[in-house]
Image (cartoon, rainbow, N blue to C red):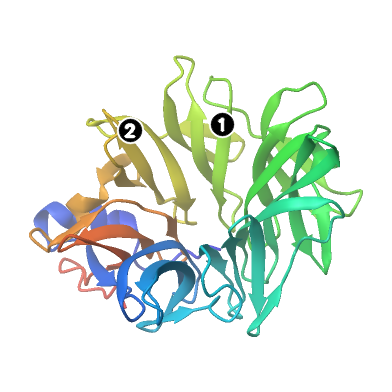
């Protein structure tokens, strides 16, 4: 889901920001009418974001609905199906198909029609975590094996079929967290010996040529991958030997510890693009909220330091980054929570346009 932009890298902007205008400008993605809060969870390569909005409906009730943010407008994608229930959108592809979670069920909306991905018999609940540009999506289903016994299965939905990952990794638990445009899937689970693994699955999951790779950890007990770009680079979080959780970047068979900000005690990465820019969230001491960060060329920066000073914005999460280097998440503006998008400013040193 990532694309390298010719002629200008985010790294050049971040390195120059001390002597130039702020490298990013903040775009308010908006809210539904009568909205009180919004958040963005993902953004595709067409700059369409997916997330959630809390708003007051016609009955005067506050509801939480899955939405997409497109061309300055906010669209409620679930109102015809779940008008009074909680939902959130976790991804949108280039065709406008939306995946997300409604109460305890993953959903897909295609062409304005609701599609239930729960095709495995006995499914009691599910998630739809991410979707790639071609409409392939991943998540997890919970299946009741016997009274009181539930098994959790990661899946990939491709070519009209749901592929179960438990058999591929050999264990009784799996969760698929992300998929790139090549159909490579990352996630985590347990193998046949009960050992925790975080995996990268390549190839058609229904083919005998499928390969499963254990990405390893930063020396701790386990790790969770949250994002994979079109080159196969993976970002996520891993425990260190001292049981501290750190963001990582996995590239060319090697997992790199990205470190954490000085004011943080732990962190994890949520997105990576093909230029190697990683975004994520650090956890400050005392567990008071989160600190969104960007990692560029070995330098970890608080995202709030990369936007105009005194803008009124306080960024609180970084959820995803697309091939254009646009970053989405949640922020406070005038005391209210908004969904935002960061786009690059004109670089005054090179004179190169880098935003939209």
**Residue 49, above or below 276:** below
Could you tell me residue 294's position as x and y percent?
A: 33, 48
Q: Residue at x 33, y 58 (%)?
A: 330
Residue picked out by circle 1: 223
**Residue 20, above or below 269:** below
Instruction: Give 295 or 187, whichever is nearer the viewer.
Output: 187
Q: Residue at x 80, y 21 (%)?
A: 193
User: Which circle's residue, 2 or 1, is located before the other in the chain?
Assistant: 1
Q: Quadrant of the C terminus?
A: bottom left
Residue picked out by circle 2: 260
**Residue 289, above or below 305:** above
Instruction: Give 39 or 71, whichever is nearer the viewer.
Output: 39
Q: Residue furthest right?
A: 208
Q: Quadrant of the N terminus?
A: bottom right
Q: Residue at x 46, y 18 (%)?
A: 243
Q: Residue furthest front?
A: 59
Q: CA distance from mark 2 to mark 1?
A: 16 Å
Could you tell me residue 20's position as x and y percent?
A: 12, 61
Kindly indicate whether the residue at mark 1 contacts the one at mark 2 (C-beta within 8 angstroms): no
């Amino acid at each position: 889901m990532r694309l390298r932009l010719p002629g200008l890298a985010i790294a050049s902007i971040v390195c120059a920001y001390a002597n130039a205008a702020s490298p990013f400008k903040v775009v308010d993605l908006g809210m539904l009418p009568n909205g009180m809060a919004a958040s963005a969870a993902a953004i595709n390569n067409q700059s369409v974001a997916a997330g959630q909005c809390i708003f007051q409906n016609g009955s005067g009730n506050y509801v939480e609905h899955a939405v997409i943010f497109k061309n300055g407008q906010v669209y409620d994608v679930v109102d015809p199906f779940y008008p009074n229930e909680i939902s959130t959108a976790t991804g949108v592809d280039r065709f406008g198909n939306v995946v997300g979670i409604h109460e305890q069920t993953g959903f897909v909306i295609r062409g304005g029609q609701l599609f239930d991905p729960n095709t495995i018999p006995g499914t009691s609940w599910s998630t739809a975590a991410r979707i790639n540009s071609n409409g392939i999506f991943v998540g997890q289903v919970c299946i009741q094996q016997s009274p009181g016994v539930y098994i959790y299965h990661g899946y990939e939905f491709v070519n009209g079929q749901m592929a179960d990952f438990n058999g591929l990794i050999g264990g009784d638990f799996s969760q698929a967290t992300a998929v790139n445009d090549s159909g490579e899937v990352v996630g985590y689970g347990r193998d046949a010996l009960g050992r925790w693994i975080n995996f990268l699955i390549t190839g058609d999951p229904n083919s005998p040529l499928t390969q499963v790779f254990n990405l390893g950890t930063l020396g701790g007990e386990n790790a969770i991958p949250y994002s994979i770009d079109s080159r196969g680079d993976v970002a996520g979080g891993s425990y260190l030997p001292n049981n501290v959780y750190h963001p990582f970047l996995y590239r060319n068979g090697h997992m790199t510890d990205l470190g954490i900000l000085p004011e943080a005690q732990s962190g994890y990465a949520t997105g990576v693009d093909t230029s190697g820019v990683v975004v994520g969230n650090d956890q400050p001491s005392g567990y008071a909220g989160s600190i969104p960060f960007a990692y560029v060329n070995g330098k970890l920066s608080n995202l709030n330091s990369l936007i105009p000073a005194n803008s009124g914005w306080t960024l609180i999460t970084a959820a995803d980054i697309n091939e254009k280097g646009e970053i989405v998440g949640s922020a406070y503006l005038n005391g209210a929570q908004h969904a935002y998008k960061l786009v690059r400013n004109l670089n005054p040193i090179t004179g190169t346009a880098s935003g939209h």
